[in-house]
Amino acid sequence: MVSDTSQHSAGHPAPKKKRVRDPEARRAAILAAARSVFAERGYAKATIREIAQRAGVTHGLVVLHFSTKEQLFLAAVPGTRDLADSVQGDAAGLAERVARAYVARMESADGADPFIALIRSAAADQDAAKALLRAMREESVNAYGTVLDRPDVPQRVDLVGAHLIGVTFSRYVLADGPLAAMSPEELTRYLTMTLAGILQGTPGRPPATG
Amino acid sequence: MVSDTSQHSAGHPAPKKKRVRDPEARRAAILAAARSVFAERGYAKATIREIAQRAGVTHGLVVLHFSTKEQLFLAAVPGTRDLADSVQGDAAGLAERVARAYVARMESADGADPFIALIRSAAADQDAAKALLRAMREESVNAYGTVLDRPDVPQRVDLVGAHLIGVTFSRYVLADGPLAAMSPEELTRYLTMTLAGILQGTPGRPPATG
């Protein structure tokens, strides 16, 4: 589906400066700039202007791609686009896929992820946190609903969200205790277990002891 | 073990004002005052002086009972004394006992619990939050270790703590979404399921799908 848009053979000279550079590269640069600005400033104090400057693009181009600061945050934070992609597949492997995607994303950010900034500033800026988590929840409910055949997907998705908020808080915000000391592989193994309990368990009934 | 310390029969007249009132009632009054002051002010801004005033006792008596503000907080917060008591019993029922104790305690506080204040102020006052959560974790590891026969009790206890932090954050701090909308009974049923997954699951392996 990728078409070659260069037109060297049509008799016109190539323009000195291409007006449209690779849109995907620009989008990636904006997202990388957004991640670092949100992580540094927190959601409330981050501005589209600073994100545009850091990405080397105009304010208008950021708005063209992402419309609002909230939309930009949602695109930049883990648990939305990446997590929605990783949700796809069979129900039995869902917990492991979500665990792997979460750990890979958080570890690659090395403590500078917008989700960490959101958790850190949520109490001080409750309205923004509520709106952002609500949007993340809605996207997640849609994605999980295509894989899980259960009537209580919204409840389970909210429990997954709460679980990952708590783990993020312990491991990355306070960075103290056994969770903070785990290797990424160990964390992935434990989260596969805990997320499976949330996604596949039966409310009110512990699983058969093993 | 309770001895009657009144001395009406020894020939001395009873003092007009009994010097030693019921110590358990005083202890309960101090804890109630501590809960309300910690919930209102957060951990960092709460003082033993204000707690003593609200309980109608002297500063010295609070120190006599609880030594330090940290010790007083740990005695007043759920997840320590009450939770340690509720841990006792058979391993198979542990998740349900912890779920019931957590929900009963948080619901009775009606949003004014020191644990909620701790989560709310943790990002702003990380050192206090780290010390308090570390102490709560140590007490919990000791209590759970008497019930669970597993080599990784510290890791599982930390996951339980992170889970309850995340649930507290969603239901009581942000107070938004499906978790916040659940009845106490529904929440207890879901937490029995999720805590069982954390306490009894096998790392790296989802449970058999049911």
Image (spheres, coloured by chain):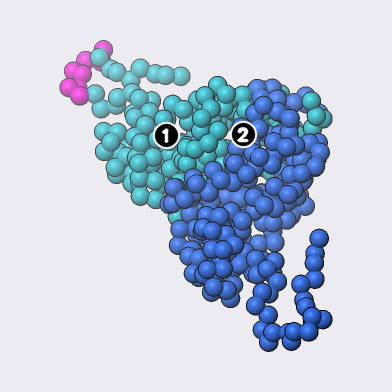
Chain colours: A blue, B cyan
Secondary structure of the residue carrying tag 1 is loop
Identify the residue under disc 1: B111
Quarter in which the N terminus of chain A is drawn: bottom right
**Residue stretch in magenta:** B9-17
Q: Is residue A91 left or right of residue B63?
A: right
Residue B162 locus on image (x, y percent): 60, 43
Q: Is residue A114 left or right of residue B176?
A: right
Identify the residue under disc 2: A154
Q: Is residue A98 above or below residue A91?
A: below
Main SS type for the magenta part? loop
Res. A198 visible in picture? yes
Tag in front: 2 or 1: 2
> Mark 2 Cα within 10 Å, few/some/many (few <14, many 20+)?
many
Amino acid carrying mark 1 in the image: Gly
Q: Which of these two is toward me, B10 or A108? A: A108
Residue A84 locus on image (x, y percent): 70, 47
Amino acid carrying mark 2 in the image: Pro
Q: Residue furthest front?
A: A11
